[in-house]
Image (cartoon, rainbow, N blue to C red):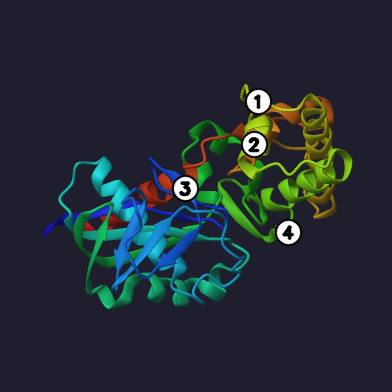
């Protein structure tokens, strides 16, 4: 096998993210080989189409094999991108919300580690033989902010990680997460998109896909019904104001200190939030891979410290 490689994976409810990829956390199983090998994982005698649709909400990500299989696909994508050998030892860097970190970290580490045994599988027709030798877990959101050195000079910073199902909040004081300020709100992008879709169905009788709505929210140029676009923009504004109110109600004053928004929903806020909303200084980090990149950076630091 090749030397141990650090790979960061952000296990989102809506999407899996690595340093170079983001794909939906959907998984469809087939008994027989699908018509195409694109995004197909072959493991344990079954075939899985990765990134297909949205899977059912799993608040406990260890209750099924889904997130483990999605992890194998994420590792395969990164190995291919880095032109690495398909036989590799992996140091997996991942994360959990700070609100549940202590409660879930041991079970999630064991779930991903699998005793460090070698696992054989195929992804998109390529054979892989990997062994996850080490799993390092870090608080999500916090890991992403550590990639932004300019923010670390602030005495206090609010961090809002807008994921698929939840918005994870925390305040950093002198670079350290203040555990008493951590909250997890069920106001993620899935809730926002579901509400937008329902309003469009009620008003216009149209059934739009999540991909269409997300494209409009990002500001991409798409051919879409103008009345539907207006509803999307109006509902997005309402969602942003509801989110800001929920943050304030959680005891975090966005008027008093910088507020950092990141995660899959940050791109939408870039078009719908500004200092005019009463924020001291909104900082929008719309790179969806920031958590995964932060995990890798923290794991690299751990490795260097162990070697010294």
Q: Is residue 283 visible?
A: no
Q: Quadrant of residue 177?
A: bottom right
Q: Quadrant of the N terminus?
A: bottom left
Q: Position of residue 229 (x, y in %)?
A: 77, 29
Residue found at x 55% / y 67%? 101
- Mark 2 → mark 3, Cα distance in angstroms: 16 Å
Residue pointed to by mark 2: 212
- Mark 3 → mark 4, Cα distance in angstroms: 21 Å
Answer with mark 3 or mark 4, whichever residue precedes in sequence.
3
Q: Is residue 77 left or right of residue 213?
A: left
- Mark 2 → mark 1, Cα distance in angstroms: 11 Å
Residue pointed to by mark 4: 186
Answer with mark 2 or mark 4, whichever residue precedes in sequence.
4
Asked if the residue under mark 1 is in contact with the one under mark 2, i.e. CB atoms within 8 Å, the reply is no
Q: Position of residue 7 (x, y in %)?
A: 32, 52
- The circle on residue 23 is 3
Residue pointed to by mark 1: 219
Answer with mark 1 or mark 3, whichever residue precedes in sequence.
3
Give the mark toward the camera: 2 or 1: 2
Q: Position of residue 226 (x, y in %)?
A: 78, 24
């Amino acid at each position: 096998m090749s030397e141990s490689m650090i790979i960061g994976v952000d296990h989102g409810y809506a999407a899996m993210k690595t340093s170079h990829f983001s794909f939906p956390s959907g998984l469809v199983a087939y008994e027989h080989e699908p018509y195409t090998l694109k995004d197909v994982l072959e493991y344990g005698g079954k075939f899985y189409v990765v990134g297909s649709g949205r899977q059912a909400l799993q608040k406990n990500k260890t209750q099924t094999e889904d997130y483990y299989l999605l992890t194998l696909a994420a590792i395969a994508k990164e190995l291919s991108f880095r032109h690495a050998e398909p036989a590799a030892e992996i140091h997996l860097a991942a994360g959990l919300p700070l609100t549940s970190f202590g409660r879930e970290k041991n079970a999630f580490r064991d779930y991903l580690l699998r005793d460090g045994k070698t696992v054989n599988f195929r992804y998109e027709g390529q054979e892989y033989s990997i062994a996850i030798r080490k799993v390092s877990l870090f608080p999500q959101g916090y890991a992403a902010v550590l990639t932004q050195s300019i923010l670390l000079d602030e005495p206090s910073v609010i961090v809002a990680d807008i994921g698929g199902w939840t918005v994870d909040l925390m305040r950093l004081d002198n670079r350290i997460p203040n555990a008493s300020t951590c909250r997890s709100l069920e106001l993620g992008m899935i809730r926002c998109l579901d509400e937008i879709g329902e309003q469009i169905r009620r008003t216009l009788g149209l059934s739009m896909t999540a991909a269409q709505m997300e494209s409009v929210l990002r500001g991409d140029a798409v051919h879409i019904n103008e009345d539907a676009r207006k509803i999307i923009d109006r509902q997005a504004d309402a969602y942003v104001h509801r989110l800001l109110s929920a943050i304030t109600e959680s005891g975090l004053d966005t008027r008093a200190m910088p507020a950092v928004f990141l995660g899959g929903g940050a791109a939408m806020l870039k078009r719908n939030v500004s200092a005019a909303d009463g924020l001291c200084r909104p900082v929008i980090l719309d790179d969806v891979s920031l958590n995964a990149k932060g995990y890798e950076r923290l794991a690299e630091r751990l490795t260097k410290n162990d070697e010294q």
